[in-house]
Amino acid sequence: MSGWLRIVGLGPGAEALVTPEVTAVLAEATDVVGYIPYVARVAERPGLTLHASDNRVEIDRSRHALEMAAEGHRVVVVSSGDPGVFAMASAVFEAVDSGPRAWRDLDIQVLPGITSMLAAAARAGAPLGHDFCCINLSDNLKPWPLIEHRLRLAAQADFAMAFYNPRSKSRPEGFEKTLQILREECEPERLILFARAVSRPDEALRVTQLAEATPEMADMQTVVLVGSSRTRLIERDGAPIVYTPRFTPE
């Protein structure tokens, strides 16, 4: 087969954070497939067809990409951030797993990108400098009791935590519940970073303590980083530095 499929991450927003590997493969593509705002980040050019679709059709989008690759097209499926972090890589492989046997023989590669969790951590300092976990707070694809169970265990284990999709207009109560769970499991002084639109012109970072955090501080463009009990804040002129030490006392 002459076609191929690449599943790529476009990073958190700034063009400087798109990897050279991803830029190179986009230059070779005949077709780009993805969610509408992510496809809009790809420049049009002769010989390239852009296939933009809604956010909740990931499997249909994946099947379309696989069909085109099987027909000989050079297809790039785009996600923001990293394609393997709550994004399209898993959806494509779900489609491969349940699709025609021939799809398993396609030339498929995943090209990593800089996810918003890591971009936000870098802006703040090193809040994920020790053990951490990452939780998607959306209950579209998993039940809320499972999210709550994982939140409690992560807090009890004293992980630093990164939260994706914290608060949407359709389910604003989820993040309010999250803060309540954290208050039941963590001390009031626990540091929280709200990082919105990292690397984009409207970027905004806010560091506060758990006792002062409110649901309205987050939306769907925000990644929330919660420190462990060891996470520290260094005051200085300008934005403070937030970091988690690499060691834990015995």
Image: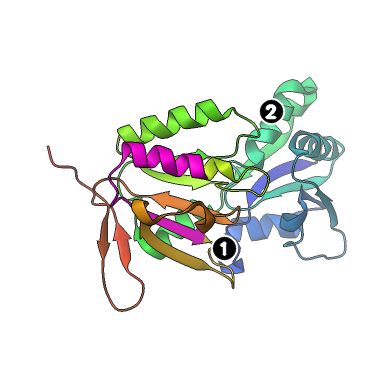
Mark identifier at residue 197: 1
Residue at figure coordinates x 19%, y 46% from the top left? 247
Q: How many marks?
A: 2
Looking at the image, is mark 1 or mark 2 nearer the viewer?
1
Residue at figure coordinates x 30%, y 38% from the top left? 158
In the image, residue 207 above or below residue 76: below
Residue 114 visible, this orientation: no
Q: Is residue 135 left or right of residue 242?
A: right
Say which residue label 2 marks: 94
Q: Earlier in the sequence, mark 1 or mark 2?
A: 2
In the image, residue 196 above or below residue 239: above
Tell me the distance, in whole angstroms, between the alpha carbons under discs 1 and 2: 29 Å
Report which quarter residue 48 is drawn in: bottom right
Q: Is residue 81 left or right of residue 2?
A: left
The x and y percentages for residue 51 are 84, 50
Residue at figure coordinates x 68%, y 37% from the top left? 108
Residue at figure coordinates x 35%, y 77% from the top left? 238
